[in-house]
Image (tube, rainbow, N blue to C red):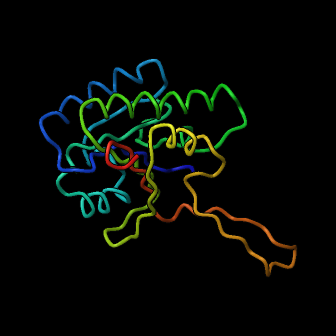
Amino acid sequence: MTGATLILAPLRPPTERWEGVFEAVTDAIAALDVAVAQGVSACPPDVAGGVRSAMPMAADHLLVFACPADIGIFEAAPLLDYTEDEALRADVARFFRSASEAALALTPDIAWIVAHDWSPNARVRWAQGSVDDLVRFATSPGAWFTHFIHFADPRGPFVQGDDAWPFCFAVGRSTG
C-alpha cells in the first residue's frame, strides 16, 4: 500500500477536549518511528479534497501520520502493509493501540482512515469495533484492501487487492 495516507479523526465535531489529542497521541507513540502532523494541510493533494469534503468540521483537527518519521511526506506504508515479521507486527499493534487509547481518553469516538486517493465524491469503505478489534484488523493480511477474486484468468483464479477506495475503521464508546 505504498503511498497511502493514515489519518486519525474525530467522528463527531471536535470539542475543546480534542485539542489535547495531538499531544497525547504524540506522547503515546514517541518510542516508535512515526511522525504526526495536525490538519488537512499535511495530507497529500490527492487525499486532501476527499478529507475536506467528507469532514469539513474536522479538517483542521485530524492527525496525519508518517512512517518512517523522516520519510518527508505523510505516508505510512510500514504501518499498513502486512508483514510476517513478528517484531514489526508488534510495533503496528502497539502504534494503533497506544494512539487509539490516548485519543479515546479525550474524545468518545475516533476514526482511522486510510486513503491512497480520495476524491470528494468517493465512496468510503467502513468497519467499526473496539480497540482490540482495530488491532486485530490492522495486523491481519491485506486488512486495508478490498479483495477481488478473478476466476476467468487463463492462469487460473487469483486474488487481487485494491486500495482505490478510502477505508474508515471507527473506534469508540458508541461504535465498539
Question: Residue at coordinates 37% horizontally, 30% vertically from top-left?
Answer: 101
The answer to whether any part of residue 96 appears in the image is yes
Question: Residue at coordinates 63% horizontally, 52% vertically from top-left?
Answer: 142
Quick check: 50 above or below 156?
above
Across and down, in percent, residue 151 comes to 78, 77
Q: Quarter of the image holding residue 80?
A: top right
Q: Residue furthest left?
A: 16
Question: Residue at coordinates 26% horizontally, 40% vertically from top-left?
Answer: 108
Residue 78 left/right relative to 46? right
Q: Residue furthest right?
A: 155
Across and down, in percent, residue 99 comes to 39, 31
Residue 22 left/right relative to 165? left
Quick check: 159 above or below 107?
below
Q: Residue furthest top?
A: 31
The answer to whether any part of residue 70 appears in the image is no
Across and down, in percent, residue 140 comes to 63, 45
Give the total number of marks visible in the rendering.
0
Q: Quarter of the image holding residue 22?
A: top left
Q: Quarter of the image holding residue 109?
A: top left
Residue 132 left/right relative to 110? right
Across and down, in percent, residue 55 comes to 24, 57
Question: Residue at coordinates 20% horizontally, 46% vertically from top-left?
Answer: 60
